[in-house]
Amino acid sequence: DALLRSSVSWLSRRDARRSPWWCTVMALTWGEGAGPDLLVDDGGDATLLIHEGVKAEKEFARSGALPDPAATDNLEMKVVYKILAEGLQKDPQKWSRMAANLKGVSEETTTGVHRLLQMAKKKELLFPAINVNDCVTKSKFDNVYGCRHSLPDGIMRATDVMLGGKRVVICGFGDVGKGCAAAMKGAGARVVVTEVDPICALQAAMEGYSVSTLESQLATADIFISATGNKDIITARHMSQMKNNAIVGNIGHFDNEVDMAGLLAWPGIQKVNIKPQVDRFIFPEDNHGVIVLAEGRLLNLGCATGHPSFVMSCSFTNQTLAQLDLWDNVATKRY
């Protein structure tokens, strides 16, 4: 009851249809207060938003300039800049107050940790951060076994395709890719791994997977899964060369692992919605189509319900311990 009477924003999965960034802003907006004391972040989105907000406020105070969505080609950042520009005119100190009040953040994804490391290297990090992702009881369980469970769950809920006998390309053989490849192999698929890191590529070979390049698999593979945390892994040009009705999905992180912007901008491309979170894109050159899951976002979340609670309890236990450590050491200035 106390929470319901408070000014804390409550958001559901359905609210994310408006914009994940809008949801993040709402989650951080606590009435007239300065916002949260601690952050539990997943992907670094909340941390990034606060840092971008502080930068925008400083520039607004200096020159009166608002963030310009046209200044970037990144579709996600266009949304961020638009939201920040709207908010600056209402409260030009919101993010600075929030950053000053924060005692720290605990981050549980590989991508989010990379963002934190980049900020720390540039000496731009505004508050302490704990890397939960690299806890062995997180990355070796959540990333591997969580994805091993939720990848086939997402594919089958979305398409009801039989995985046995299918040729499946897994892009990336890190912890996430290892779980994905194991799941597809266990389902009877013929698994091909693409990997730029020689150690991970050798691991894939030693596990019995075929290791190849993505380009060499375009004409023959049935399913393509990006599991890298990087961008432009599966490009629009790649998809234009795939076999008819090849399935494309992402379980790495952002929707730019699969080049959705390039696909939507392809001349004459036709998008046919099959059902929620499942779309077929038809190329005008030969009328062949590819089936894209969850609009290039995380298919295990968009097409299913993500990792099961048991494996996530490992990650969230680490998050809880990190949060306690951050709070207990506010006075000691340990971080």
Image (cartoon, rainbow, N blue to C red):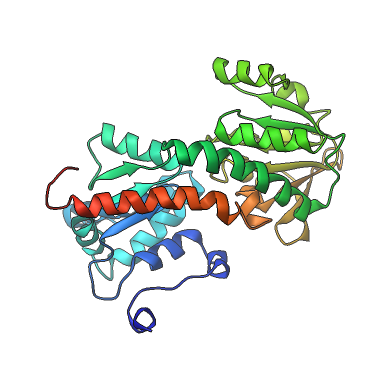
User: In screen coordinates, is 332 left or right of 135?
Assistant: left
Visible residue check, residue 266: no
Residue 92 is situated, as x and y percent measured from the top left of the image, at 23, 64
Quadrant placement of the N terminus: bottom left
Quadrant of the image occupied by residue 219: top right
Q: Residue at x 78, y 51 (%)?
A: 156
Question: Relative to 155, is 30 above or below?
Answer: below
Quadrant of the image occupied by residue 238: top right
Quadrant placement of the C terminus: top left
Residue 208 is situated, as x and y percent measured from the top left of the image, at 73, 20
Q: Which residue is nearer to you in this view: 100 or 96?
A: 100
Q: Residue at x 62, y 43 (%)?
A: 147
Q: Which residue is nearer to you in this view: 24 or 328?
A: 328
Visible residue check, residue 223: yes
User: In screen coordinates, is 220 left or right of 320?
Assistant: right
Q: Which residue is nearer to you in this view: 311 or 215?
A: 311
